[in-house]
Image: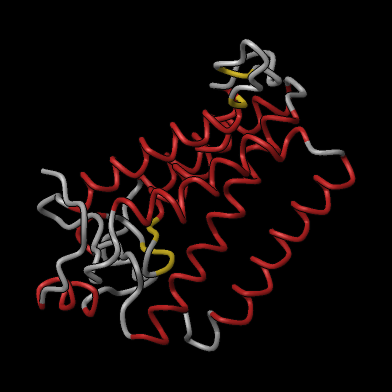
Amino acid sequence: MLEFWGDGSQEAMDLVNSIVVRSTDNFNWTFIFILAVVFYVYWSEINKKNYEVIFAGLALYGVHWLYEIGNAVIGHVTGYPLWSVSNESTTFILLIGVCWELSMMFSLAGIISFKMLPADRNTRYFASNGRKGISCKFAGAISMALLFALVESFLAGTSNHSFIWVYKWWGVLPVFVTTYIPFFLASNYVPDMAPAKRKKFLITIWGLVAVLLIVLIPLGII
């Protein structure tokens, strides 16, 4: 069953209120296995010197963490975040909107998206008769964003409430436009930036993530 919008129900609010962040009550060994898979993928690409692939992965993953921190701050300030994950759906919740399994998936999502691009990343679709067409990077980002939004719609409708949307105005469309499109634009475009610009982007993103986590977690905000 697909859910397209939050329902604002008391049940959804109660589920969010019951979330225990960074509790080890549901912890199990799949945590280690998933971590090993992610390490294998990254080190395989490093050994092959596919650094552009690594940049794609780190670009999306960094943007993902900024969004998750922002979502947790929204939850702290307003009472409810835009999205949440339930205690029952995961072995470990990192922040109120992201669990370990989901976060590790996003650590690989940028790599997957980048590898799905044509070998010639200057390819443009529907370019003919003087029309410039659509960049394969942009088209790829839109396609991946749509796929992920639909998957999230499925997760929001699962019986264990893998995803919880409280607000009635939040759902598939806003998550597609405001969240997933920026994620995949980062993975598809950052690797081809000028080296200095790319380095600045990644250092800024990850530096900001580190500072926010170091400051906000001890304060109990996220």
Q: Nearer the viewer, residue 135 or 36?
A: 135
Residue 105 percent across, percent down from the top left: 44, 42
Q: Is residue 165 left or right of residue 81?
A: left
Q: Is residue 189 left or right of residue 163?
A: right
Q: Residue furthest front?
A: 129
Residue 193 percent across, percent down from the top left: 79, 38
**Residue found 48% across the figure and 84% down from its top:** 221
Residue 9 percent across, percent down from the top left: 11, 73
Residue 60 in view here: yes
Q: Nearer the viewer, residue 29 or 142?
A: 142
Q: Residue furthest right?
A: 196
Q: Quadrant of residue 147 in the image? A: top left
Q: Is residue 102 left or right of residue 86?
A: right
**Residue found 26% across the figure and 73% down from its top:** 19
Q: Is residue 48 above or below residue 102?
A: above
Please state, as top left, top right, bottom left or bottom right, where the N terminus lies in the image. top left
**Residue found 52% across the figure and 29% down from its top:** 140
Residue 40 in view here: no
Q: Nearer the viewer, residue 88 or 114?
A: 114
**Residue found 68% across the figure and 15% down from its top:** 130
- Numbered label tally: 0
Q: Nearer the viewer, residue 187 or 23?
A: 187
Q: Is residue 19 above or below residue 61?
A: below
Residue 95 percent across, percent down from the top left: 42, 68
Colour convention of the picture: secondary structure
Q: Quadrant of residue 84 in the image? A: bottom left
Q: Is residue 31 above or below residue 11?
A: above
